[in-house]
Image: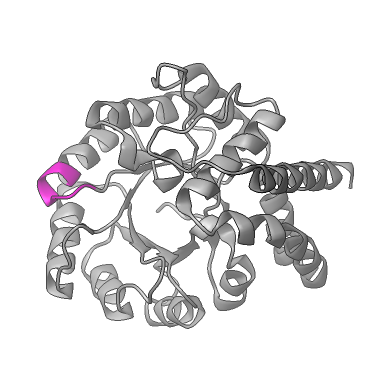
Amino acid sequence: MLRLNGITPVMATPFHEDGSIDEPSLRREIDFSIDKGAAAICGPGFGAEFYKMSDPERYRFAEILVDQARKRVPVIISTGSGSVVNTIEFSQYAEKIHADCLMVIPPQRVALPGTEVVDFFSQLCESVQIPVMLQDADFTGAGLPSNIFVDLSNRYENFLFAKLEVTLPGQKCADIVKRTKGRLQIVYGLAGIAMMDGLAHGASAMMPGTAVVDVYVRIYRLYQGGRIEEAKDLFYRLLPYLTFAMQHLELAVGIEKRVLVRRGIFPSARLRRPTLFYDDAYEAQIDELVSRVVALSEECHRR
């Protein structure tokens, strides 16, 4: 049974000037994440701009993740699509190429009742044998009710993870952990901005981006080692970067790429359009935050 404990970053997607995926840089990012202590790697999620990718590109992204990881850490493939047919097709392909887990977001373009969400994930769990993670991505609300997670956990042995990307997720996290007796592990998303909340309420893993994965790893290890105040102090130094970045998804992805450029992993911070563009004042603020977070990462390595 796969268990996730630690930092499980979502890969960003490097792009060439012509808009194609820069595969060598993506492979370098994967190695960087693993070398810096990632417990698992994930993609193509929101942080990879999957919503701007074609299906063949998403499949290729999955192939690169599995190939480059070389079983050093588990690989989580994000396979959610607008229909259960497409989701199952991609999920079965991910299983075929030896992915370790699936991360699946429920269909979002049309509001659906809870019973339809349960049926969607029931069909998915029955179609594959590898573990399934439900990505509860409701960036401005409470997301799905706990009962859905508990019900699916009780019914399917391979329904093992819930990724919470909702407002004030702590009580929901604790409730799911308690009612499933810890069988269903909770992963916190949203760039890890609620990391302290998650650790206090029983979350086992965090899913930020890759740019400063080493800082998150240091925080996690301090906390789990009982050095909770030190973990909090370090996390609070990360917050200015996170609170600015999390104002908009495109900003969060773009600033992560700028950090990866500064750290020598990506040659370019290019995003696919449509995206955001900034005036000189914002550019200066972003540059300062990038410099500060890179310095924080370097400080972690000196300790």
Image coordinates for residue 295, horizontal then vertical, percent: 82, 43
In the rendered image, residue 223 lying in the magenta stretch gets the answer no
Does 29 sit left or right of 87 as displayed?
right
Instruction: Name the residue rendered at 54%, 22% in the picture.
Output: 25
Q: Residue furthest right?
A: 302
Q: Number of callouts in the render?
A: 0
In the rendered image, residue 82 lying in the magenta stretch gets the answer yes
Instruction: Name the residue rendered at 41%, 25% in the picture.
Output: 64
Image coordinates for residue 165, horizontal then vertical, percent: 43, 64
Image coordinates for residue 145, horizontal then vertical, percent: 30, 79
Image coordinates for residue 284, horizontal then vertical, percent: 72, 44
Instruction: Name the residue rendered at 72%, 50% in the picture.
Output: 215
Q: Quadrant of residue 119?
A: bottom left
Coloring scheme used: one colour
**First to last magenta residue range:** 81-87
Whether residue 83 is visible here, answered yes or no, is: yes
Q: Is residue 268 above or below residue 151?
A: above
Q: Is residue 87 above or below residue 270?
A: below
Whether residue 206 is visible here, answered yes or no, is: no
Residue toward you, 93 or 135: 135
Q: Quadrant of residue 89?
A: top left
Instruction: Name the residue rendered at 43%, 70% in the picture.
Output: 166
Does 186 sit left or right of 145 as displayed?
right
Does 234 sit left or right of 197 as displayed?
right
Residue toward you, 237 or 124: 237
Residue toward you, 148 or 247: 247
